[in-house]
Image: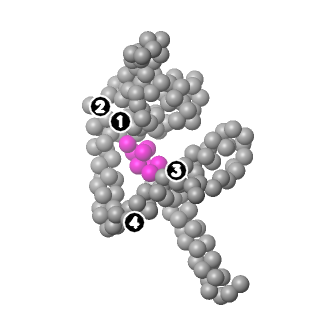
Amino acid sequence: MSSVSSSGASGRRRLTTQIKVSLRDLRNELSILNRQVSNKIAVKDGDLDCLDLISRHGPLSPSALARLAGVHPATLTGILDRLERAGWIARERDVQDRRAVLIRALPDRGREVLRLYSGMNSALDEICADYDESQLELLADFMHKAAGAGKTAAQNLADNGQPTAQKQGP
């Protein structure tokens, strides 16, 4: 192996490790931010996660939400009860199937959450302003693939307890 390719491989491993460490740091910092937001609106961390999923993907059935959130349906019932009592969500009959229930976020309360994240959103806007469109496309693609890898890893652990790696994308 030539010193150029060896140096290139070493540099690539170093950068890949830095990315993984930075993603862990980001996860920790976002976890702290989410706890702060949860405390401000008086909901549990897991309840905030479900509220976010409902806000972004709703209206949803409880079973669809349970799958997205990776929680047991019985656990989800308690989460939904708390969110409904606190005025964050509404449970409504599905107009297509009156036997089914859909969960939707209440928009007025959602603005309250967005306000609490405004500092982070503004900081991200400033960070993104330093990148051109092709760089932003690359970053968006990386983040999408990294989220997919996390989803796959979580599903593998849930299904068989094994942290099997799968290549994401082409």
Q: Secondary structure at mark 1?
A: helix
x%, y% of residue 53?
44, 36
**Residue that mark 3 sits on:** 147
Badge 4 amino acid: Gln
**Residue that mark 2 sits on:** 107
x%, y% of residue 33?
41, 49
Badge 2 amino acid: Pro
x%, y% of residue 63?
53, 25
Q: Nearer the viewer, residue 112 or 1?
A: 1
Is residue 170 toward the left or the right of residue 48 in the image? right
**Residue that mark 4 sits on:** 135
Q: CA distance from mark 2 to mark 1?
A: 15 Å
- Residue sitting at 50 percent across and 24 percent down? 62
Badge 1 amino acid: Ile
Specify the principal SS of the magenta part.
helix
Badge 3 amino acid: Ala
Q: Which mark is first along the chain, 4 or 2?
A: 2
Q: Nearer the viewer, mark 2 or mark 3?
A: 3
Q: Which residues are magenta?
A: 30-37
- Residue sitting at 37 percent across and 22 percent down? 90
| Residue farthest toward the top in the current orientation of the protein | 99
Q: Nearer the viewer, mark 2 or mark 1?
A: 2
Q: Secondary structure at mark 2?
A: helix
Residue 41's label in the rendered image is 1
- Disc 4 + disc 3, Cβ < 8 Å: no
Q: Nearer the viewer, residue 91 or 143?
A: 143
- Residue sitting at 50 percent across and 63 percent down? 22
Q: Residues within 10 Å of mark 4 (few under 14, many from 20)?
A: few
| In the depicted structure, whether residue 49 falls above or below residue 132 | above
